[in-house]
Image (cartoon, rainbow, N blue to C red):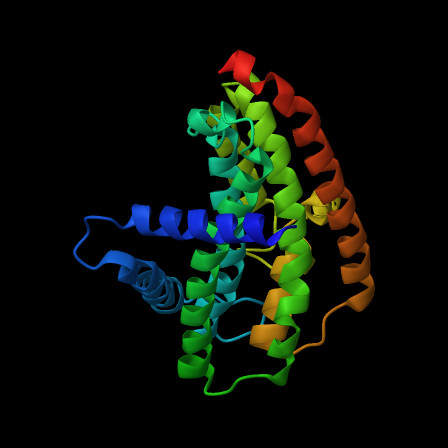
Amino acid sequence: MSKQNLHLIISLARRDISARYRGSAFGILWSFINPLLLLGVYGFVFSVIFKSKWQAGQEPNSNFAIILFSGLIVHALLSECLSRAPSLILQNPSYVKKVVFPLWILVPVLMCSAFFHFLISGLVLLIGVIAITHELHWTIIFLPLIILPFLIMLTGISWIFASLGVYLRDLSQFIGIIITIALFVSPVFYPTSLAPAIIKPVIYLNPISLIVDEVRNALVFGKLPDFMALTVYYICAILVFIAGLAWFQKTKKGFADVI
């Protein structure tokens, strides 16, 4: 990637983030306030009202809030990327007509914007872990290693969806169903061990399942990552990334005709 393209990605990502909060009283502070309020609500509802417990035999406690929130922010990253990708090209028709504009960078711009909000939510989660458990496990150093392949895979998937969204306008409507399925067929609300055997293969195929488990293990439970599983995930993520870019570059030739 050239310095010019990198500068363009950063510039467009900044504009995308600032545009989201333009005109609001608190501006970009909402990116911090929203996840903070959500964490407080989850803590109250699941720990105080429902008295939820993560594993059978455990006493219900406020740890459930951070366990749940750690999975939800991973899903939120997936949700933002997949929900915006199908309309990414359609919302930027002027770029399609510019021969010299590298259309492929629109997806990295989307990824930077989504990752920014993920980082803010992650900071809130980190504060919640310290406030609730009064400790921070040294295994958090593995979080970049865990998140990186997820970002790589999401980029590849987003390229595919961005391209398909140009030709299949109904994809934007259907994507909400996919995002909802990804939420419930993953260990966000429950540990994988409690899932019925019949749906476990589907859970393992869900791209967020391993990441949710590993983020939770490293940040909340202080466990080392499953390096073998992560290695396989890295290989799959790189293949999806390459396939996604190749598909986008091949299909972009028809964007101008369709738009």
Q: Position of residue 149 (x, y in %)?
A: 69, 56
Vertical relation: 148 (above or below) 125: above
Pick the front one: 118 or 250: 250
Any part of residue 122 in sight: yes
Q: Residue furthest top?
A: 257
- Residue at 36% from the left image edge and 61% from the top image edge: 35
Q: Residue furthest bottom?
A: 134
- Residue at 61% from the left image edge and 66% from the top image edge: 215
- Direction from residue 255 to residue 233 in the image, left or right: right
Vertical relation: 255 (above or below) 20: above
Q: Residue furthest left?
A: 25
Residue 257 occupies which quadrant of the picture? top right
Residue 44 occupies which quadrant of the picture? bottom left
- Residue at 46% from the left image edge and 77% from the top image edge: 129
Vertical relation: 89 (above or below) 23: above
Q: Position of residue 234 (x, y in %)?
A: 76, 55
Q: Position of residue 71 (x, y in %)?
A: 53, 59
Pick the front one: 210 or 152: 152
- Direction from residue 229 to residue 180 in the image, left or right: left
Q: Position of residue 37 (x, y in %)?
A: 30, 63
Pick the front one: 41 or 56: 41
Any part of residue 61 in sight: no
- Residue at 59% from the left image edge and 37% from the top image edge: 104
Q: How many dots with numbers?
A: 0
Residue 246 occupies which quadrant of the picture? top right
